[in-house]
C-alpha cells in the first residue's frame, strides 16, 4: 500500500511536490497529521508540540519509560493476525539508516 503512495507525484515538475518521506518518524508524523485538524491554529500548535525521533536520543534515555496498555499489540490484535512495523516498512521503501540506529541503540543499552 505504501508503494502505491510512493508512486504518486506531480506531473508538471516532480521536484515541486508530493514529497514522500522514508524515515519512520516522518511516516508516523504524517499518520498523526491525518488525525489532527492541522489547518487550524489549534491543530498546528498540537503538531508543533510533538517530538519524534529514531531511537532514543540522549536527553530522553535517562527518563523513565511508560507503557500504554491500551496500545499493546498483544491486547489489540487477534492471535495470528498479520502486522507490520514502521522499521520494516521504512527499510523496504528506501530508508538507509536502519543499521545506524540499531548500532546506536546497542551502544546506548
Image (cartoon, grey):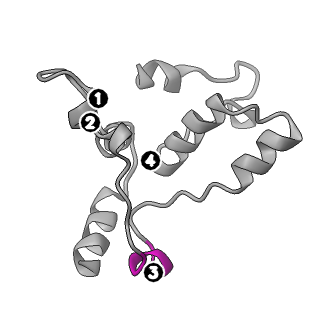
Mark 4–mark 3 Cα distance, whole angstroms, equals 19 Å
Q: Which mark is residue 94?
A: none
Q: Earlier in the sequence, mark 3 or mark 2?
A: 3
Residue of label 1: 76
Residue of label 4: 24
Q: Name which residue lies at 22% across and 73% down.
A: 106
Residue of label 2: 73
| Residue 74 horizontal/vertical position (percent) | 20, 35
Q: Name which residue lies at 50% across and 80% down.
A: 59
Residue of label 3: 58
Q: Earlier in the sequence, mark 4 or mark 1?
A: 4
How packed mark 4 is, by other alpha carbons closer than 10 Å (few <14, some 14-19, many 20 or more), is many
Mark 3 vs mark 2, foreground winner is 2
Mark 4 vs mark 3, foreground winner is 3
Q: Can you say whether 24 is above or below 52 in the image?
A: above
Q: Which residues are magenta?
A: 57-63
Amino acid at each position: 500500500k505504501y508503494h502505491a503512495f510512493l508512486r504518486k507525484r506531480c506531473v508538471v515538475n516532480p521536484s515541486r511536490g508530493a514529497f514522500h518521506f522514508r524515515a519512520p518518524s516522518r511516516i508516523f508524523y504524517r499518520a498523526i497529521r491525518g488525525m489532527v485538524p492541522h489547518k487550524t491554529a489549534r491543530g498546528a500548535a498540537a503538531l508543533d508540540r510533538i517530538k519524534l525521533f529514531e531511537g532514543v536520543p540522549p536527553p530522553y534515555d535517562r527518563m523513565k519509560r511508560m507503557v500504554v496498555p491500551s496500545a499493546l499489540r498483544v491486547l489489540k490484535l487477534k492471535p495470528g493476525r498479520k502486522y507490520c512495523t514502521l522499521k520494516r516498512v521504512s527499510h523496504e521503501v528506501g530508508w538507509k539508516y536502519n543499521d545506524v540506529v540499531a548500532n546506536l541503540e546497542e551502544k546506548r543499552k
